Amino acid sequence: MRLVFMGTPDFSVPVLEALVAAGHEIACVYSQPPRPAGRGKKDRPSPVQARAEALGLPVRHPVSLRSEEALADFAGLEAEVAVVVAYGLILPQAILDAPTRGCLNIHASLLPRWRGAAPIHRAIMAGDAQTGVCIMQMEAGLDTGPVLARETVDIGPEETTAQLHDRLSALGAVCIVDTLARLDQLEAVPQTEDGVIYAAKIDKAEAQVDWEQPAEDVDRLIRGLSPFPGAWTSLGDTRVKLLGSRIAEASGVPGTVRMNPLRVVCGTGAVELTQVQRAGKAAQSAADFLNGSAIEDGTLFKGRN
């Protein structure tokens, strides 16, 4: 098919690669404009733009799609389908209507659960046993369109957002190629209004650990916010990001450190920390963290007041 691809972050890159490998004609790739990044704050293209250019594909990165010029440019591509995955701009109705067979979105949840911006984070933070990807026909509402295909995966007991992100990205790539191949045979199933939950954008204010909470909640927070923005706690005046954890046993006042392995007491139960990161330092295993720190059994991590 003749496609327009619309995506921005790393999550979208395997999908673009899969569409090219499947032999689809990519008329154009749309991505968010380059943003200042790195120490020099020079404009850096998005992961999708960088990969598209490496593949020799034309790229556009308009700030908005609402101008007459942007609408005319998009319509002029004469695409059959637009494939959209984590693009980052709301598509006006004229854009949604332009491809002859519509716009298809790859969404990283089992709709209607976790509509919105942060479905992977929220699924882990909520303790969901399963998640997946849906291929949805786009309409004006936020992730409200009928679903053409869905695939389900189990969430591992120690899985982080980074790990689940990569699995769902690969799954979405396989699923969209299959969906396009069977587009004439698939029925678009409207979403029910039962079970609708919105995956609100992650607020950094959520990231400070409250050690008074049950271990299950603390563990989910740590894994759900890893690697970004990263759940954190304080060791004296030093902020420490917590990037990996599992449920463990220990006793004491919430926030108390127990050694070998590195565990922290919670309101009920405890968590074992498996990966941490001091402010300004690289991430490291808990064992390496202990070797380089003057932490003793009974040390207190300071959590949210």
Image (cartoon, rainbow, N blue to C red):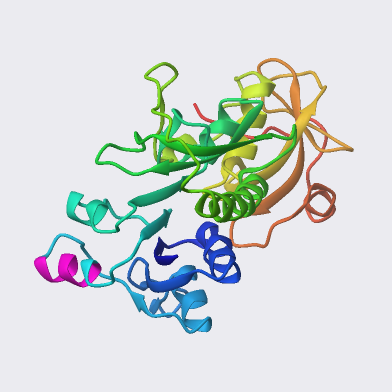
Percent position of residue 145, x then y: 35, 36
- Lateral position of residue 131 relative to residue 104, left or right: right
Residue in the image at 24% along x and 41% along y: 140
Toward which corner of the image does residue 13 lie, by quadrant?
A: bottom right
Percent position of residue 36, x then y: 37, 73
- Give whichever of 267, 32 is nearer the camera: 32
Residue in the image at 32% along x and 51% along y: 102
Percent position of residue 161, x then y: 61, 44
Percent position of residue 290, x then y: 81, 48
Stretch of the chain drawn in magenta? 68-74
- Quadrant containing the N terminus is bottom left
How many numbered badges does the structure rendering display?
0
- Asked if the magenta segment contains residue 90, the reply would be no
Toward which corner of the image does residue 147 lie, by quadrant?
A: top left
User: Going by the picture, which residue comes out furthest to the left?
Assistant: 68
227 in relation to 25, above or below: above
Magenta residues, dominant SS class: helix
- Asked if the magenta segment contains residue 73, the reply would be yes
Residue in the image at 36% along x and 38% along y: 143
Residue in the image at 31% along x and 38% along y: 142
- Give whichever of 12, 138 is nearer the camera: 138
User: Going by the picture, which residue comes out furthest to the front?
Assistant: 185
- Lateral position of residue 30 relative to residue 248, left or right: left
- Give whichever of 168, 221 is nearer the camera: 168
- Lateral position of residue 111 relative to residue 249, left or right: left
